[in-house]
Amino acid sequence: MQQKTDDSIHEKLKDTAIFLAEYAATLMAVGAQTSRIQLNTVRMARSFGYHINLLIFPKTLSITLLDAEHNRSYTYIKKTPSMGLNFKANMKLSELSWNAFDNKLQLKELWHNFKEVVKEKRENRWTVLLLVSFANACFCRLFDGNLTSMAIVWIATFIGFFIRQQLTKRGLNHLAVFVICAFVSTMIGVTDFLFFHGGTEDISLGTSMLYLVPGVPLINGVMDIVDGHALDGIARLTNACLLIICIAVGLSATVIMFDIDPTTFTKVVRPDVVQAAIADGLFAAVAGMGFAIISNPPRKALVICALLACIGHGIRYFLMHNTGLMLDQVTASTIAGFAIGLLAVPFAMRIHCPAECFAFPSLLPMVPGMFAYKAIRDLINIVRLPDAYTMEYVSRFFSNASLTVLVMFGMVVGCIIPIFIFHRQSFSVTRK
């Protein structure tokens, strides 16, 4: 009889551990930050009366589940599946953990609900394609591109993102996909240099492939490091850096093929700072909504993404260009990120959706894409130009690369400070 009891307890531990591993691995795959994965998984284990030790690595995770008396345990190792960013799944899986905790759901019911979330269809790919195209065209405008540049960038994004969708669907390696898409998009972007001469040719080329910048992995990586999960954070940042290198390879191929040296950058001066800040905010709203849809957020979060992007970018523009302030981009980005994070928490509580589902996409219009582009351009020139110019471009490369890193770090830290301050509220918003 004792043997049967032991076998029954062991079997329950095994079944529960397998489910929790699948649950945690899926959260990791859809882009949840490490803290949320840990809290959700521990919460679900507690709903069964079990203790859990969870180790999360970049590609695998290990779960050890123990019974209430710590007499029996079961360890299960699960490989993280390959899935695209999916903030809607993040929200629903977080909600599921609270349902399990509050209502003591049985394992069979949890499996059913989990599978329903995982197999739920994403947004229509044509809707995503159109919104991303308009988003990147507005991103071009935020960097002072004119109507000609915006049109070229729209076409470059539409064709490049369509190719990305098709190649991803066919299972091609994601690094190769980024190289191909960056090359195709910049080939279209360079037409402004070759044929149109619209006046902001540098912006056309520099923003034609910025829809590929892995903003959410970069933001998640910084957040994980700040939150004490250094290993996962470094892994996410490393993966994002590999993608950026792939973008650079595609851009380099275009620049070398046509012998383009875009060393000058257009700068438009707008006398009315308030009006310009409002205009930038409106373009940022479209960009924020368009970039957000790539991560498949809940539809109710899209409008909030647009609003927060508008407010955040408008604040940053005003702080940087108001004659009485003239803040540097790092400080202005940090303050704007803090404003986005501060507004994201009450919105999250209002619609019962994790704050990062719309706070992170709202930051994307502030990603220092042109600094990154300049750094890549400088790196290309270090290789291409004579030795007499090498030190000049080495200096420029480190300057632009450092600014890119500092702006990213500043705006992310600014955004997550309110989320950490209101930690309890931020991680319980999906509880209904």
Image (cartoon, rainbow, N blue to C red):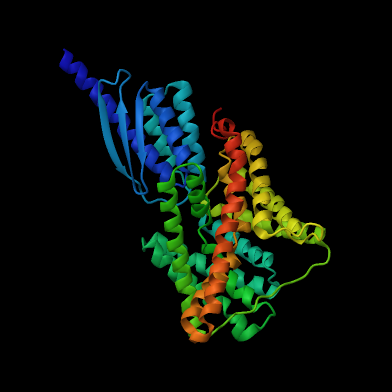
The percent coordinates of residue 250 (x first, y second) are 46, 73
User: 127 and 179: which one is in front?
Assistant: 179
Q: Is residue 417 above or below residue 49?
A: below
Q: Is residue 306 visible?
A: no
User: 164 and 22: which one is in front?
Assistant: 22
Q: Is residue 340 above or below residue 50?
A: below
Q: Residue furthest top?
A: 1
Q: Is residue 250 above or below residue 172?
A: below
The percent coordinates of residue 113 (x first, y second) are 42, 33
Q: Is residue 108 left or right of residue 244?
A: left
The percent coordinates of residue 215 (x first, y second) are 53, 56
When asked about the image quadrant of residue 19, the answer is: top left
User: 181 and 165: which one is in front?
Assistant: 181
Give the residue at x 65% y 83%: 196
Give the residue at x 54% y 65%: 401
When asked about the image quadrant of residue 130, the answer is: bottom right
